[in-house]
Image (spheres, grey):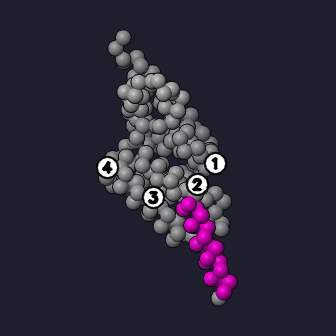
Amino acid sequence: MAAEAQAEDTVTQQVADLFEQYHKPIFAYLYRLVNDWDLAHDLTQETFLRLLRTADQLPAIENPRAFIYRIATNLAHNTLKRRGRFTWLPWRRVNERQTATEDPAKRIQEQNDVAQLLASLPVDYRIPLLLYSYDGLNVREVAAVLNLSEGAVKTRLFRARKMFRRAHEEEVDDEPS
């Protein structure tokens, strides 16, 4: 009995540690996916509640980070599917290379342009691109999150980048001179 209680305490502590480590990144990821602060907050809470419910599986999980992102991705995807919408916020990292002297209005416009370009990509290509490029998951982790092979993830990333570049080139060509 004491051994069971100790094992349960260890698993509970592991979930608490995972919450502490991944709460903010998961919330940020979900917020970019759903573009709704309250919904992102609710989905983040639900992600960690589901993690707690499956805590007995944690010792067998090779990559807890990918497992948590999978829970969050599935929750967000299912929620947005029910709502009939899937929106994205601008990628903040676009601005990391910019200097402080740049026009804020120009930066906002570029963020909006990136958001529109991302919105033009099919969901099956947006999600791996966002997980890999913005959230810093490696190919193996993205594969685990999306329940795909690593080869399928690499293919989707390649195609997503190609689609994104093509959409960007078309946007630049459509701008008035």
Q: Which badge, 3 or 2, is on the more N-terminal residue?
A: 3
19 part of magenta stretch: yes
Spatial CA distance of label 3 from label 1 is 23 Å
Q: Which badge, 3 or 4, is on the more N-terminal residue?
A: 3
The residue wearing badge 3 is 44
- Locate the C terminus and report the quarter of the image it occupies: top left
In the rendered structure, which amino acid carries the disc numbered 3?
Answer: Thr
Q: Which badge, 1 or 4, is on the more N-terminal residue?
A: 4
Q: Position of residue 57 (x, y in %)?
A: 60, 69
Q: Position of residue 12 (x, y in %)?
A: 58, 72
What segment is highlighted magenta in the picture? 2-20
Q: Nearer the viewer, mark 3 or mark 4?
A: 3
Residue 3, compared with residue 59, is above or below; it is below
Which residue in the rendered view is the most extreme toward the left? 83
Q: Nearer the viewer, mark 1 or mark 2?
A: 2
Residues at marks 1 and 2 touching, judged by CB atoms closer than 8 Å:
yes
Residue at left offset 33%, top offset 47%: 85
Residues at marks 3 and 1 touching, judged by CB atoms closer than 8 Å:
no
Residue at left offset 39%, top offset 60%: 42
The residue wearing badge 2 is 66
In the rendered structure, which amino acid carries the disc numbered 1?
Answer: Arg
Which residue in the rendered view is the most extreme toward the bottom? 1
The residue wearing badge 1 is 140
Q: Element under label 3?
A: helix
